Image: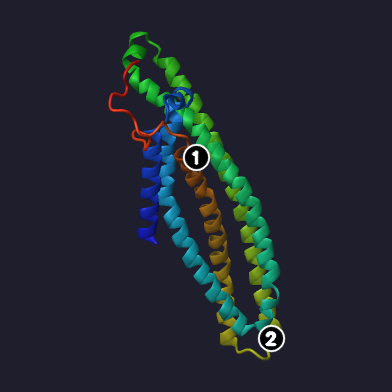
Amino acid sequence: MVTAGVRASKQLHNMLLNNILRLPMSFFDTTPTGRIINRFSSDIFSIDEKLPWAFHDMFFCGVAVTGSLIVISITTPVFLAIVPPIFVIYGFVMSYYIASSRAFKRIESVAKSPMYQHFSETLSGVSTIRALRCHERFIADNATRSNLASNAHFVWAVGNRWLNVRLESLGSIIVLAASLFAVLARGSVSPSMVGMSLAYALNITVDITWLVRCLCEVQFEMVAVERTDEYSNKNQEAPNFTDVPLPENWPAQG
């Protein structure tokens, strides 16, 4: 998984770099520098670091949830009756959050671009800014752009808390159901098996919560892949070499 992640991120970076170097000048005239820097910094960092770990955690959380469900179902088979509706509710909450989180990620990425652009332009013209004594105005502009980027991240953080509250509530329902079924089956199940069932019920709430969060994180970080792919597929300049036969004296004039 690590090897595949490194290979994929390297390929995406090379595709982005090769295409950026071959884009027409009209693209650089109309595209702020901050947007290009944002692709090579924040988005590539998400692809390199965050996305592989999100896949890694999602896989192991899925294995842990499957194992816990098997143990609980063996000790209290009636627990299987509530598994489908619980997972349907989890899926509804996750799909609702994913649609919002992807929009939050786009807003955050777009909000960072003006900050990067302003920093780059300020760094290149720092001597002129000091000579004209405009440093206070540029500091205020940088603070304003940083606040806008922080506001976009705060919106994502609020959405994340919204998801966490609902996942914890659903986890409490799972523990309650496992406890009730264990009490109802007290005559046919040994106390040790009941204790093991409750222990795994407590663990599965944490595992399912992390599984849903990892699934959302994968979708969330895939926005970085989408953004790099956007610039990797833009129309390039004419190729340096063509298969069209040309006369030996070309160009004869012009």
In this picture, is 202 found above or below 1? Answer: below
| Residue plotted at (63% across, 71% down) | 175
Q: CA distance from mark 1 to mark 2?
A: 57 Å
| Residue plotted at (56% across, 54% down) | 216
Q: Which residue, given by chain and number where applicable, does mark 1 sit on? A: 230
Q: Which mark is residue 97?
A: none
Q: Which residue, given by chain and number where applicable, does mark 2 sit on? A: 185
Tell me the amino acid under the disc marked 2.
Answer: Ala
Q: Is residue 201 visible?
A: yes
Q: Is residue 162 visible?
A: no
Specify the quadrant that holds the C terminus: top left
Q: Earlier in the sequence, mark 1 or mark 2?
A: 2
**Number of callouts in the render?**
2
Residue 70 is situated, as x and y percent measured from the top left of the image, at: 57, 79
Residue 74 is situated, as x and y percent measured from the top left of the image, at: 60, 84
Q: Which label sits in the foreground, 1 or 2?
A: 1
In this view of the protein, which residue sits in the foreground, 191 or 137? 137
| Residue plotted at (62% across, 59% down) | 167
In this view of the protein, which residue sits in the foreground, 157 or 40? 40
> Is residue 62 rendered to the left or right of residue 122?
right
In this view of the protein, which residue sits in the foreground, 169 or 20? 20
Tell me the amino acid under the disc marked 1.
Answer: Glu
Crowd around label 2: few <14 · some 14–19 · many ≥20 (10 Å): some
Q: Secondary structure at mark 1?
A: helix
User: Residue 213: which quarter of the image?
Assistant: bottom right
Residue 83 is situated, as x and y percent measured from the top left of the image, at: 66, 72
Q: Secondary structure at mark 2?
A: loop
